[in-house]
Amino acid sequence: MTTHYDPRGFPPFAVTVDIVLLSVVDDFSVLLVTRGEEPHAGSLALPGGFVRPDESIDEAAVRELGEETGVGSRALRGVHLEQLATFGAVHRDPRMRVVSVAYVALVAGAPTPVAGSDAAGAAWCAVDDVRSGDLAFDHAQILASGIERVRSKLEYTTLATRLAGDRFTLAELRRIYELVWGTPIDPANFRRKVLASDGFVVPTTEKRSAPGGGPPATVYRPGPGVTLNPPLLR
Amino acid sequence: MTTHYDPRGFPPFAVTVDIVLLSVVDDFSVLLVTRGEEPHAGSLALPGGFVRPDESIDEAAVRELGEETGVGSRALRGVHLEQLATFGAVHRDPRMRVVSVAYVALVAGAPTPVAGSDAAGAAWCAVDDVRSGDLAFDHAQILASGIERVRSKLEYTTLATRLAGDRFTLAELRRIYELVWGTPIDPANFRRKVLASDGFVVPTTEKRSAPGGGPPATVYRPGPGVTLNPPLLR
DNA sequence: GTAATAGTGTCTGTGAGACACTATAAA
DNA sequence: TTTATAGTGTCTCACAGACACTATTAC
């Protein structure tokens, strides 16, 4: 931080936040926007925008999550938001020098983006259907980092409950793991491990019947724990 | 990334890199510099500096690691460098709006910083002796993040070999784990787990005797593996 | 009835951790 | 001779994973 170099003498940096907002319903999906202007007009991109001088980077991420994704503030409660990594190749944006701080966010139930701002072009896309070449800038790389972060964090944290919402059965929770990881999981062993993890899930008195048969399943809500001890293995 | 907002109309951001360079010899230590100018003149700080317009953030980190730490390029071969996190509170630097991208670096044997640049004020400090209040800016927070990152990565990666250098005995490797984690480890179980991890260490024909007694120990070098399967538990 | 699922029980293999034991070298 | 360490062996406990089984519901 000692400076032989005065940054005021050089063309400035712009700082942006880009958000990998993920959810699970029928698929493990990411919210993408269609760019309305150059560069990359018409391409898909991660929602994001410039950090303003009077807000921290974290604050900018929260603001963009609301504005740009158009996900209503009701759905935004209980959203998980964490910093992912920072991308700063020299020419990643052709307009000027832009450094992007990427975030990962998790929301339950893929809520429909409300109209307004740029949300007109916002849509949920199954992550397996997104082709790298379709994404603007270096967003394919950012998306890949975000997906990998979430896949690995499901192993040793209770983050899956952020994707499950505030009421879920163990079958629904297991389905989230199966869709995110892309592997089948033994229901009996999954049940035992989840219930053995202190603070992961809390049973309610409620029961829920699934279509297609089977006895009513106990409904659970997220527990107070954040880390999983022992971890769930992929 | 769609912009209703033109960043050119606002005071610019500066982007810096700060480096948490860690090593283990007698202690688990971090390289700190004494600041020569305001703000925080005389305080300890992490080595770092401004990112230049013509270099990526990663390139700036590599450059600063050489320049600012003054660790010779011989010792810099085999150094591990990875991005840690980005810190962007509004007033973290009183001069102007500065966003800092922090990196963690690991080097073997705490090489003495060579004179030149600001390295005159660079010194290795045991991480347990660093008091948060002694550090400039938000560097205490950055240091804490870096330490925690390394502590947890020793569990599931082969990073400890970056702290051990290119020739080491299992006792020396174990000592690194003990100093970083601050807990004693059973030598017999440690040996078995390390040798059972494919690609962690490779035996050489060399033997080395430790002062104080005991038979000569086999010397190992780092293996090609990067992840530890199964992990070493703290 | 039939199919599907909730929830429980059980067996096996693997690995973590504790610790005993010997062999070898420094002081 | 004493002390410390290298390296091996072994025992126990816990858990992961595979899978059988019963009970209960939708259709």
Image (spheres, coloured by chain):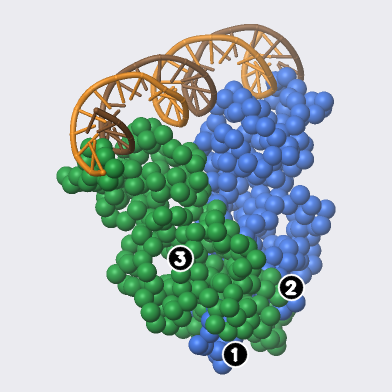
Chain colours: A blue, B green, C orange, D brown
Residue B112 is at least partly visible in this image = yes
Give the spatial CA distance, label 1 vs label 2. Answer: 20 Å
Residue A97 is at least partly visible in this image = no
The residue under label 3 is B124
Give the spatial CA distance, label 3 vs label 2. Answer: 35 Å
User: Label 2 sits on what residue type?
Assistant: Glu
The residue under label 2 is A55
Which residue lies at the image location 76% right of the left edge and 58% below the top edge?
Answer: A71
Q: Position of residue C14 (x, y in %)?
A: 39, 26
User: Label 3 sits on what residue type?
Assistant: Trp
Residue A232 position (above or below residue A76): above
The residue under label 1 is A8
User: Label 1 sits on what residue type?
Assistant: Arg
Which residue lies at the image location 56% right of the left edge and 40% below the top edge?
Answer: A155
Circle 3 — which element? strand
Which residue lies at the image location 39% right of the left edge and 72% below the top edge?
Answer: B113
Task: Using the image, name the chain to which the residue with label 2 belongs.
Answer: A
Task: Using the image, name the chain to which the residue with label 3 belongs.
Answer: B
Q: Position of residue A37 (x, y in %)?
A: 64, 77
Task: Using the image, name the chain to which the residue with label 1 belongs.
Answer: A
Quadrant of the rendering where the N terminus of chain A is positioned: bottom right
Q: Position of residue D7 (x, y in %)?
A: 26, 33
